[in-house]
Image: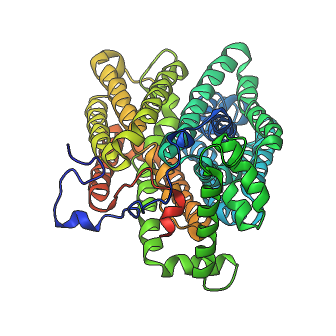
Amino acid sequence: MADSNEPLIPDEHSRESFELPEHPPHHGHPSPRSDTPNAYVWTLTAIAGISGLLFGYDTGIISSTLLHLSPSLSPLPGTELSSLSKSLITSSTSLAALLSSPLSGALADRHGRKSAIYLADFLFILGAVWQAVAFSISDLVIGRFIVGLGVGVGSGVVPMYIAELAPASYRGRLTTLYTGCITGGQLLAYAVGWWSAEVFSEGVGWRVGVGLGAVPAVVQGVRLVWQPESPRWLVMRGRRTEAREVLRKVIGQEDDAGLGGEVGRRLGEIEEGVKRAREEEEGGEGWLDRWLDLWRDRQGRRALGVVCMLQGLQQFCGFNSLMYFSATIFSLLNFTNPTATSMLIASTNLLFTLIAFTLIDRIGRRRILLLSIPGMIIGLLLSAYAFSHLDLSSPSTTATLASPVYTTTALLSMLIYVSSYALGIGTVPWTAQTEVFKMQHRGLGNGLATGVNWGGNFVVGITFLGMLERWGGEGVFGVYAVVCAVGWWGVWRWFGDRGGTGLEEVEA
C-alpha cells in the first residue's frame, strides 16, 4: 500500500513539497502507554478548546442576529439595514482578529500561553456585554471588534498550547478537537439564536443571544486557575521543576522510573530543543528580531509559506460566508425557518469534523486534503447551478416557490460542500501550523498564519453580500470553486506531511 504521506500523483515536483524532518532515531524504548493521552490531557484539551467554542459561537450567532437587527438599529424606522451595514457588523470581528492574531504568538512567548488565554477571555466577556447593550450600529460594531480581538488571540495561541501538551501520535486528533469546538460553538449559536427569537421579542432576543457569549469565557477563565502552563514555555523560562511536574501529570506516572524514565526523556528533548533554538537565534528578543530570524531560515520561510497557503485556502474557499450569512441565504430561498435550516448546516459541519478526528492521524494531513477538496468543488458547482435557476433579486421572489427542485439542490449542495470542508481544510491548517515551525519560530509563525486566516475571513465577510447582489449565487460559488481548484493544486505541489513527529524533532 502506498504511503499516505506521499503525493497521490507523484512526479518530479513532489520532492519540492514542504515536509517535516524525518523521525530521527530515539535512544531508549519508551513504553507505548506513554504516548496515549490520559484523562488529564483530555481535560486540559477540553478546557482550552472553549476558546474554539467562543470562536464558533461568534461566527454562528451573527447569522441569526442579522435577521432581527433592523427594528432595533435601523437608522430609519421600518427600513432594513443595508448590505453594507450588515457586512461591516459581520466583518468587524475578522478585522480585529486580523490585527490581534499576529501579536498573539509574541504575547504567548513573552507572558505564557495561559496569560494570553486569560486576555482572550476578558475580551470575549467585555465584547459580549458591549454588544448586548448596543443601541446603534456603531455600538454593535465596536462590541464585535472587541470580541474579535479575543478571537484573534485565542485562535493563535490555543492550538499551539494543545499541541505542546499532546503526545506526538495523538497531536492531530487533539488539535482537531479544537476545530470540533469551533463547529460545536457554531451549532450552539444557531440553537441559541433560534431559541432566543422564539422566547423573546424581536428587539430583545438578539441581545440575549450575543450576551450569552460571555458565559463560556467566564467558565474558561475560572477553570484556567487549575490549568498548567505549557512545559515548553516553562523550560524556555528556566522553570524546569514546574515543567517536570506538568510532564509527570500529562504522562500519568507517579515517578520517573515508572515508564522507563519517560518524563526525563521528554524533558531532555524539550531542553535540547530550547538550547538549540537559543544557539540559532541571532541576538535580540524583539518582535522584529524574531521575524528576521524566521525569514532568514529557509525551513522557516517554507513552513510559513505552506501554512499561510492552507489558512488562506480555508477562508477564500468561502466557507465562513455560509456560516455568517446562512440564515440570510435561506431566508432569500423562502425557507420557513432559516435559522433552523442553518442548524442542519452546522450539525453536518460538527459531524464531519468528528469524523476527521478519527482519520487525520491515520491517513495523513496531505491525503485527507487531496481527497476532500474535490468534494468541496462538486458542492460549490452544484450550488452555482442551482442558484443560476433562482431569482434572488428581491425577498418576495416567486421563482423560489416555483422551483423547489433547485432550492433542494442548493441545500444538498451546501451539505456536500460543508461535509467535505470539515473533513479536510476546515481542520488541517490548525494542526499543520503547530507542527512545522522550530521552537524559536513557533509563537511568531502561529500568529502570522492565524493572521492570514483572519485576513481572508475579513475579505470574505465584507465582500459576500455585495458579490451576491452583483453576480448572483452562481457567480459567487463559481469563484469559490475556482479557488478550491487552485488550492488543491497548491496542496499537491507544496504540502508534505509527517504527522506523528515530535515537536522537538522539527529542530533537527
Between residues 358 and 141, which one lies in front from this camera angle?
A: 358
- The residue sitting at 44% across, 56% down in the picture is 312
Q: Where residue 452 sits: x, y (%)?
A: 51, 60
Is residue 134 among what the camera can see?
no
* Quadrant location of the N terminus in the rendered image: top left
Q: Where residue 118 sits: x, y (%)?
A: 78, 49
Between residues 499 and 26, which one lies in front from this camera angle?
A: 26
Q: Where residue 76 sits: x, y (%)?
A: 69, 37
Is residue 330 among what the camera can see?
yes
- Residue 387 in the image: above or below residue 276: above
- The residue sitting at 27% across, 34% down in the picture is 388
- The residue sitting at 59% across, 68% down in the picture is 273
Residue 222 left/right relative to 444: right
- Residue 108 in the image: above or below residue 228: below
The colour scheme used here is rainbow
Residue 166 left/right relative to 287: left
Between residues 280 and 286, which one lies in front from this camera angle?
A: 280
Q: Where residue 373 sits: x, y (%)?
A: 31, 43
Q: How many marks?
A: 0
Figure quadrant of residue 209:
top right
Judged from this view, the residue extending furthest toward the bottom is 283
